[in-house]
Amino acid sequence: MDFAAIDARLAALEACLETTVPVGLEEKLFVGVDLGTAYIVVVVLNSLREPVACAMEFAQVVRDGLVVDYTGAARIVRGLVGQLEARLGRKLTHAAIAVPPGTGERDCGTHRHVVEAAGLEVTAILDEPTAANAVLGVENGVIVDIGGGTTGLSVLEGGRVVYVADEATGGTHVTLVLAGNYRVSFEEAETLKKREDMQAEILPVVRPVIQKMASIVNSHIRNRDVSAIYLVGGTCCLKDMEKVMERETGRPVCKPANPFLVTPLGIALNC
Ligand code: ATP
């Protein structure tokens, strides 16, 4: 696995949150919409599948993979798509989306309708680990996706997902622990959690939550021949959390420089 190339691609996407790469008027664009528990992210790639624009918004319209506020979700996606269209000077017409593994047909339909309400035709509905693996290219190992609400894991053998699981405990729990420890509001704790200068101080505070995430992973891979763990999802941005995960699981842990954007990028790659 060429981690340097993966990191360069993710860094280019991150830069596209602030800047826009010009595209041709007729150029084919690839769009991915990630409806998450904590963030909605829209990624646009050019005909070479390189990032050209990206927009995201904090949103609490999805819970456990289900859309719980349809109107709110549709409004946010419409807003993000509108922003990107203005930046690119182009209409966006198609998008791929992703859902947690095991999401039923009806719930997939709701995700689709949210995106269609923003004027995009949905060309593909993927499961999230498959999307993440479009970026990572894991042949054998486990992708652990720690987002806002849950720790999800997908075991890959020969490049194919052979086992999935998803359990409560994610970034929201980390934030709640910080809010309690520092006696601040959830919003303040959310900001604190992402401050680079606070990372060394907060790791010991949130270590028990990371240990809980590791115990979830352990319980699912105990009897499996898993050679390495690959971390994705916003919560894995916590500095050195991979070291805790490595110690608790006894397996090598790989983490891209920006684990937050792996799944959104992978969704767009499958458009
Ligand atoms: P889910 O996968 O549970 O549906 P989601 O797709 O919204 O949720 P992500 O976008 O992968 O999940 O991650 C969101 C979580 O990541 C939030 O809890 C957020 O606070 C956390 N997060 C984002 N950036 C950082 C950061 N720099 N440091 C620590 N946590 C972060």
Image (spheres, helix red, strand yellow):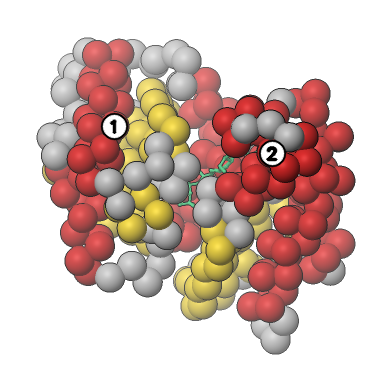
Figure quadrant of residue 190: top right
Tell me: 185 left or right of 254: left
Figure quadrant of residue 227: bottom right
Q: Is residue 72 above or below residue 215?
A: above
Q: Earlier in the sequence, mark 1 or mark 2?
A: 1
Q: Secondary structure at mark 1?
A: helix
Figure quadrant of residue 28: top left
Q: Quadrant of ligand 1?
A: top right
Asked whether mark 1 and ligand 1 are closer than 8 Å, the reply comes as no
Question: Observer-nearest residue: 215 or 176?
Answer: 176
Q: Which residue is mark 2?
A: 179
Q: Secondary structure at mark 2?
A: helix
Q: Is residue 122 above or below residue 90?
A: below
Q: Find residue 51 and report its horizontal and vertical position in percent.
A: 42, 28
Q: Are marks 1 and 2 in contact (CB under 8 Å)?
A: no
Query: Residue at horizontal 83%, vertical 65%?
Result: 248
Query: Residue at horizontal 58%, vertical 42%?
Result: 234
Q: Amino acid at mark 2?
A: Ala
The CA span between labels 1 and 2 is: 27 Å
Q: Residue furthest bottom?
A: 223
Question: Observer-nearest residue: 7 or 229?
Answer: 229
Q: Amino acid at mark 1?
A: Ile
Q: Which residue is mark 1?
A: 76
Q: Residues within 10 Å of mark 1 (few under 14, many from 20)?
A: many
Query: Residue at horizontal 47%, vertical 60%?
Result: 129
Query: Residue at horizontal 26%, vertical 25%?
Result: 79
Question: Observer-nearest residue: 208 or 218?
Answer: 208
Q: Is residue 238 visible?
A: no
Q: Find residue 117 and report its horizontal and vertical position in percent.
A: 14, 39
